[in-house]
Image (cartoon, helix red, strand yellow):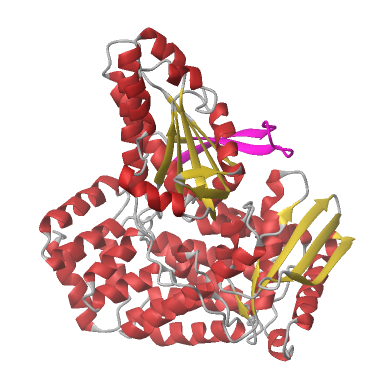
Amino acid sequence: MSGYTSIAAVRSLPTSSRDSISNIGSPEPEQLGSFVAERPSHKLVVILHADVVGSTALVQHDETVAHERIQDSFRRFSETIGAYGGVTHEIRGDALVAEFDRASDAVCAGIAFQADNSQVNATLEDDVRPEVRIGISMGEVVIADNTITGAGVVLAQRLEQLADPGGMCIQDAAYLSVPKRLPFDYKKLGERRVMGFDEPVRVYAVSLQPGGVIPEFETLVQPQAAALDLPEKPSIAVLPFTNMSGDPEQEYFSDGITEDIVTELSRFSELFVIARNSAAVFKGKQTNTKEIAKMLGVQYVVEGSVRKAANRIRITAQLIDAPVGGHVWADRYDRELEDIFQVQDEVVQAIVAVLPGRIANSGAELSRRKPPANLSAYDYLLRGNHALPRRGESSSKAIAMYRKAIDLDPQCAAAYAGIAVAEGFKIWEGTRYDEDPFTRAFENAREAVAIDDNDYRSHGVMGLIYCYGGEHALARRHLERAMSLNPNSAETIGLWAMVLAYSGEHEAAIEAYKRALRLDPFGQEAVYPEALAESYYMTKRYQEAIAVLKTMLDLPIHYAHQQIAMCYAQLGDMAASERYRKIYYDRIPENYDEIKFFESHMRMFLHQEDRDHWLDGYRKVGLDI
């Protein structure tokens, strides 16, 4: 039963009960003046709407007990929402409305509350057991007088009505922004038509994976939290092109087209190009381009769509001067699918031609990668690229796609580079320590560079592999080459920061990381926060290292908890150290070999004093070495 339609149920409660329910999460009386004076605030947020199932029946069963238990449920839910960085704006009878900055926090809060509420209900001996449904959406809302309104709120309510008792449904835009490494299962409910909305909404039911651990809330490190100044160069962000094919399974293709256009624009040293990861945060969100440009710190925004049908493709694209709000350029391309690479080039050249200032083509032309010679190989390459950033088990899926691409096109350098990155993840994430992944990573990286010396990604991963092996001079050489080929690659600059960190140039590593983060302000995991954490630890800035490591706890890696324990031990907080040490040992998989991880970690340091510093930390948390 919705909080918008349950007036009768609320009215049936005593006056004092209605007041106490509606006041949960509301401002104190002395604060009301300031709230009334506020102007409405428009903002893009994640909305959570929760509703008690069958509240009328609960009230009819036992009015007083129902009131007390509904009130207790929402009190506990409000506490959980606050613990995950959310704000409870209203409790309307038997329904609750809250806002979050991140969809992942809203989902975690919902999962955590449902688990808690299930345990509480299990202890009750009667049938007055408040079960809650949850809906989560993303959209622009208006906040005034502690009341939140807007289409996003209504959509969250409609989604909640689709959920099972004790369950949760989320909008596809929220689904796309929740990192898939989190321990959640998603059930596709398909496109649903909901009252008040013209277009159908793609809906997912969310639940905790069997044996999964609900992630704790961790505050993100945001060095760029202040307003971002516009770079001196023409600055541009390419938003994810909309998949117009009518098949959600084709998302990888439209995402791949977007990434290729970003990559080609990034080759121009005269431009400042936001990384695809950060632009992808706005996928599916109804946010105006002016606001997006402000959040990313750019002047220009590219929007577009892709429609793929049989052997035909249609791409539309437009360039917007965001502060002005005017269209600088727009065009549509209807071509054969085999012309896809030519279309990408035409889009890039058209954008560059209308940007202010003289953009030289020579450098970008010299650094251009060789496109796959086979369209089916290109399709598998895009599928591999789509799976790769998720890390964990997705690394194996990515490798399978890359190998299919290579079977069709043995000269596909980007596929070899992708395999090298995925094999490198296996080493770094601590799931494999035999020689095979290291050898495979090195051989595939070397093959990629041999096939196409102009592929920046191939040189970047080659630098990473050499860093793993402690070959710092060779690592630097390849990463310098990668940065010259693509000066706007946040990933490459993040790898450069890692090499600097392990070479003992800690302050330079921190500055390089911040430069990568400016290019990719919302994609911290893609710019290797490990480099920042390592540098903070090695300069004995343990609190800052802890803050960074805590942002990594939902990555499919196992050492972050251990390194947090080491930092707390160095600070003398042995209670906190022991708490994270215990979590670390509770979560490491059976095949995890911490001694091998320690050995591989030590091999990466250039200077003995840095090795000794880490060795001291490992021993303080009980590693017998």
Is residue 586 magenta-colored? no
Residue extending furthest top?
Answer: 61
Q: Is residue 34 left or right of residue 322?
A: left
Is residue 197 magenta-colored? yes
Q: At 33% across and 76% down in the image, what residue appears?
A: 604
Q: Position of residue 530 (x, y in %)?
A: 36, 68
Q: Nearer the viewer, residue 619 or 469?
A: 619
Q: Main secondary structure of the magenta part?
A: strand
Q: At 40% across and 82% down in the image, what residue appears?
A: 511
Q: Is residue 436 left or right of residue 45?
A: left
Q: At 45% across and 49% down in the image, what residue appears?
A: 36
Q: Position of residue 254 (x, y in %)?
A: 71, 57
Residue 398: image quadrant is bottom right
Image height of 493 relative to 405, above or below: below
Image height of 175 relative to 610, above or below: above
Q: How many marks?
A: 0
Residue 116: image quadrant is top left
Q: Position of residue 378 (x, y in %)?
A: 72, 61
Image height of 60 relative to 109, above or below: above
Q: Which residues are magenta?
A: 183-206
Residue 334: image quadrant is bottom right
Image height of 1 relative to 411, above or below: above
Quarter of the picture holding the C terminus: bottom left
Q: Is residue 606 left or right of residue 205?
A: left
The answer, for residue 373, to whether it is visible in the render is: no
The answer, for residue 71, to whether it is visible in the render is: yes
Q: Nearer the viewer, residue 449 or 84?
A: 84
Q: Nearer the viewer, residue 534 or 541?
A: 541
